[in-house]
Image (cartoon, rainbow, N blue to C red):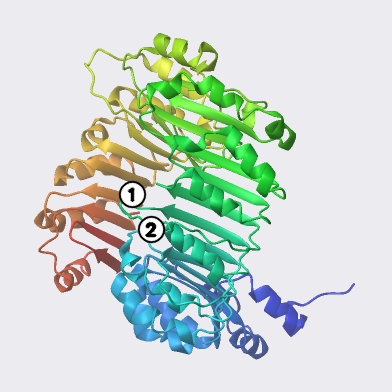
Amino acid sequence: MDVSVFENLSNELFMEIFEYFDGYNLYHAFINLNMRINRILQNSQIRVNFMGIDKKHIFDYYCTTVLPFFETIMSLKLQSMHMKIFTRLFDFERLTLLQSLTLDTIELNEMKKHVLPKLPTLSNIRFLKIFDFTNEFEELEDNIHQVVFKLPNLLHCHLPYCRFLSSSFATNIKHLKIHFHSFNDLIKLFNYIPSIEYLNVCLHRDVLNNDVDSFMPQFQSKLKYLKISVVNIKFDLIEILLSNLLHLQHLSFSAFNLEYVDGRRWVYLLSNYLTDLKRFQFDVKYCCLPKSFLGNISRIILTFQTEYWLEHQWYFVFNYCPLHEDFHFYSYPCKEKLYVTEMNIFQSKVPQMSDIYDYVDELYVTLSDMENDFEGLKNTIGSGYWTSNGSAFQNAHTLVLSNPEIYEPNNFSPSIKLLKDLNQLIIWPKLKHLSYFYRFEYLEVVLQHASNIVSLDLHEKEYFLKITKCYPKIEKFRFEEGFLTYEDIEQVCRVFPNIKHFTLCIESLERVYAILPALFEKCRSLNYICIFSDLKEFDSASFVEYASKIMKNFVFGNNRFRLWIWCEQ
């Protein structure tokens, strides 16, 4: 019988296998098996992913032992907490063979000092993603594209806010995600990137910014996929844009303007200009819906149910939530991962409603006993649209239960009704995360049914103090209001004996130093903590000296109001 030996594989096959590992795991799995494999390892093009590495000793080991062993880094993912240390050990200019770079919420100063000046040297970059969830990079919007778009081999790019100046140039980018404040900049984009095929753009125009040229030039584009979200943009401008995108095959459009809920206008635009279109996704939201619009909903819906829409099998649904007067009109099936709704809503019906929300992972439900003129609304909108059953969100893993009003203590429904209503929306065993901002009287009933959750958010600390049962499956806990005291620690350990991640509020920096030792001593599984407090007197050097006495390996970050700690005990 033939016996295959792992070491007998060819060098080429080893190289292909190694592509499935990131640098850290590759090093630990194959280092020092034999000299031949070591040589193959050294010549491998590795992927380095620091995302999710929250232990200082692992990060240090990665940088000082693993990376120096390999000759070529092909892919690099960095986030803010690692940036300063990484740039101290490695110069971007040395990463000349880098093909993929992801920067997640890097500080503005680091971006200016270590990234933008060095990007032109990375001539082999093909994939570049820069995430800015803090909007700090708006300061760089005038020049960031002048650096990025000149990278000769760049094909896929994700940029924060960008503004084009008068300089003219062309790039070979084919796949782009970007934010604009100006409609003119969006039009200029097609001159700078003539070969673009995929564009995901957020266009949030300032209403005070009169940036639209009186004469809008025509342009030619090979664009096939467009995902666009607009704020303060007139339908006329969208018509100008789309009438020039004759090769478009996939259009995903979202807005916050009722002007776009006009089926006749869309039929004219799509049938005359976008004849190659194969997929059309549509999403319009509006808050505080005018009463004049409510009475016309039935007529408006009919404009999206004509022969054109039925032939293409493009169906549309509307939801109207009476409590907040929120209107949502969207194509079916819903593609959103997060869905916000109320328990009792008006909703239009479409074929095969059972799978309309299969993509929804996070469900946000407002629960309320507030009296509303539902009967009057039924007369205005149409009783055929009223539903108290909702539709099943059968793939939801996160549930947020919210209560925006204040009630008298005896003015609430029995828990059996609440559970009956929720049973129509979700599948309890699938839930992994619960955020609960409703009545405490229902909390433990909900927790009993959501028996598989591993993460819990509560609005108030007082809710947590009243919990009587133990929940060993819950590893992440957060509360938003109230300060944790030394006396509360026993309750934390009793209710959540296996807690690993804890987000909390502590009254002062002095109390932080007093509480942390006891918290880590009693919660032995704790490896991440996020503290909201007044940290204006926080001193990093003093904290390092203090924390070294209660934690083995740790890394921390802080700002004026928050302290993050990742550690091992």
Q: Is residue 343 visible?
A: no
Q: Which quadrant of the structure image shows residue 441? A: top left
For image coordinates 27% across by 37% down, the residue present is 459
- Residue situated in front as seen by the camera: 389 or 260: 260
Identify the element where label 2 is drawn.
loop
Q: Amino acid at mark 2?
A: Asp
Closer to the observer: label 1 or label 2? 2
The quadrant of the rendering that contains the C terminus is bottom left
Identify the disc placed on residue 207.
1
Q: CA distance from mark 1 to mark 2?
A: 10 Å
Query: Relative to 226, is 148 on the left or the right?
Result: left
What residue sits 14% from the left and 71% below the top?
542
> Residue 325: x percent and y percent?
37, 26
Residue 42 percent location from the top left of the image: 59, 87
Which residue does the numbered mark 2 point to in the structure image? 211
Between 471 and 116, which is closer to the camera in this rendering?
116
Q: Amino acid at mark 1?
A: Val
In the picture, which quadrant includes the N terminus?
A: bottom right
Identify the residue at horizontal 55%, vertical 48% (top origin): 239
Work out whether residue 475 or residue 240 is closer to the camera in this orientation and state it: 240
Q: Residue furthest front?
A: 215
Mark 2: few/some/many CA within 10 Å (<14, 14-19, 20+):
some
Residue 468 at what x, y percent from top left?
A: 29, 30
